[in-house]
Image (cartoon, rainbow, N blue to C red):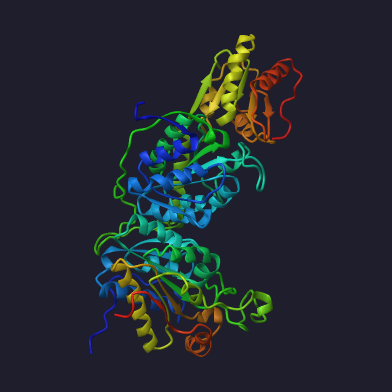
Amino acid sequence: MAKLEKPVSIIKPVGYCGGCGHGVIQRLIAECLEELGMADDTISVVDIACSYWSLEALDFDAIAGPHGRCAAVATGVKKVRPDKTVYVHAGDGSSYVIGLAETCYTAIRDIPITMIVVNNGIFGMTGGQLCLATTLIGDKTLSSKKGRTKEQAGQPVDMLNVFKNFDVEYVARGALYDAKHVDQTKRMIKRGLENQRDKKGFSLIEILSNCPTNWKMTPVEAAEKVKNETEKVFPLGTYVDRGGAK
Amino acid sequence: MHSDYMLMKGNEAIAEAALRAGCRFYAGYPITPQNEILEYMASNMEKWGGTFIQGENEIASMSMLWGAAAAGARCMSSSSGPGYDLKQEGISYLSSYNLPAVIVDVMRYGLGDGEITEGQDSYWQAVRGGGHGDSRQIVLAPASVSECAALTYEAFHLAEKYRNVVIILSDGAISQMIEKCTLPPTYEHDKDKFDWTLTGKPRGVKKNKVTNLDRTIGREAADTIMKEKFVAMFENEQRWEEVMTDDAELVLVAYGISSRVCKSAVRQARKEGLKLGLLRPISVWPYPRKAFEKMPDCVKGYVTVEMSLSTQMGEDILLACKHSKPLYGHLTGVRVPTAEGLIEDCKQILAGKVKPVEVL
């Protein structure tokens, strides 16, 4: 078996909570870029929330887009630097709630970037409030202390069912709760980056993650919740693959 | 006709000058009376090799701008009234990130949806920071179509000089009038010329992190850079025009469309033996305080001439003259002032029949 090397693009440890999926995602991005030989021409755009840590952890030119605006910031970067790899690492609140218009219109314009959206069902950085797009019915948060109800906040939305209607390159959802799914998710990220390398259009990869701190669970319990509850509302798989499987 | 002169609208002059200044990224959203800027960019940006995007809203347009600015492009957006409200998130962020960009505010009159006609009651909004937090933007106010072109051209240079947002503060009248316009030469901007931009660098080369309040150097150091920038802009970038102020008894102070009327009023008044002068701020931030320092002793007072209900610029006049002279207001609200009305007002002021402004 080959020895598993840490990607050289990861240059410093940062402050993700124990058991959080962001660090895994950050590592997968670095691994994919290096394996594809694309790490030398990459510009990253991170959400000002939890994924901000990735700006410091990874050895790429980077900009922190404010909450909700990452896709639009990335559009500006990609238009000026069309030959570079531009990826977004952002949360579900940023991409699907406050920034839904920006994410939708970046997809509708088919801007050739790779957008990685972390669906952890909560607003993590602000301390654990409800995320309108992804918090499951019944889940308790700081702004839904008795558990989310439809009457209070509507139901969570599978946004990939929205994005699959747009003429984009690739839309897929992965998860991180076991090695098999980490591997599947890595292939999805790689596909999104390859599309950019091949001058194809917009790719969006949503990743079901967890937030043990704000879910008030152990990392193992949080992973079980994703597997047993979250995945039922947000099914895994490929929603759009315009170019078709290779 | 010489190719560097054209008959054009104020808005078109702004757009053409931006392209000639090397602006290669424009994102904006339609709103009257600035639409010709967006339309001109839509029609002409491609042949200059740049990007035009009609944003889904003003906020997204501004977000695209800071991505483009961080990647090294000269970039611009424009709006008016309610749309400019939405621009302010982006202005605050661009300022925080020390990113250069040119934003055009073609003022329209009124609160809320207001009117689509000329106005000057967005002065405070334009000169007092431009968004949440403590920031300063250079604000240039053209009074002719040629000046729309000249100031826009210069705005890109100033934006880069200070790594700061520069605002062109026009209004519905200046934006829609058609005049002969002197156009600037073309300038090719090199998007790789700065060491702080995002270029996508190979391994082993130090990477750039473009962040809020520059978190890479710490808050204290970032604040110091910001404060030094405020002082440098204030010291170096005050601009104004004077008309017959040397022996003036009353000095009219006005910018943009109102200043054009004032210029006529001064000439007309002089024929009647009335000693009026005009001080026209071209930069409304930094406010041209240096101009007030050398006003002659014979000046009995200043008259702020503004299309607003409050003496919005009047506060700056009193600060600039250190409250040494009384301030009178000729505030016309939704109407463009007239030379006749102004002269009549000035006669009343000199006769001691008008009180200085009561509400600042």
Which one is in front, B298 or B120?
B120
Query: Which quarter of the picture shows residue A154?
Result: bottom right
* Residue B246 in view: yes
Q: Quadrant of the C terminus of chain B?
A: top right
Q: Measuring from the top left, give residue B50's x and y in whole percent.
A: 35, 49
Apparent side of residue B120 relative to residue A14 in the rendered image (left or right) = right
Quadrant assignment for the N terminus of chain B? top left
Looking at the image, residue A69 lies above or below residue B41:
below
At 46% from the left and 75% from the top, the residue drawn is A164
Q: Give the camera-side residue of B134 and A244.
A: A244
Query: Where residue A64 sits: x, y (%)?
Result: 43, 61
Residue A10 visible, this angle: no
Q: Position of residue B352 (x, y in %)?
A: 75, 17
Residue B197 as seen in the image, left or right of residue B179? left
The answer to whether B78 is drawn above or below residue B209 in the figure is: above
Quick one: which residue is furthest to the right in this view? B353
Is residue A137 or residue B7 the one in the foreground? B7
Q: Percent position (x, y) of residue B156?
A: 40, 41
Q: Nearer the viewer, residue A183 or A24?
A: A183
Q: Residue at x 47, y 56 (%)?
A: B63
Q: How many marks?
A: 0
Query: Which residue is located at x 51 percent, y 64 percent?
Result: A68
Instruction: Residue lying at the far front in this picture: please name it.
Output: B1
Q: Is residue A111 above or below residue A242?
A: above
In the figure, residue B173 lies in which quadrant? top right
Q: Residue at x 59, y 38 (%)?
A: B123
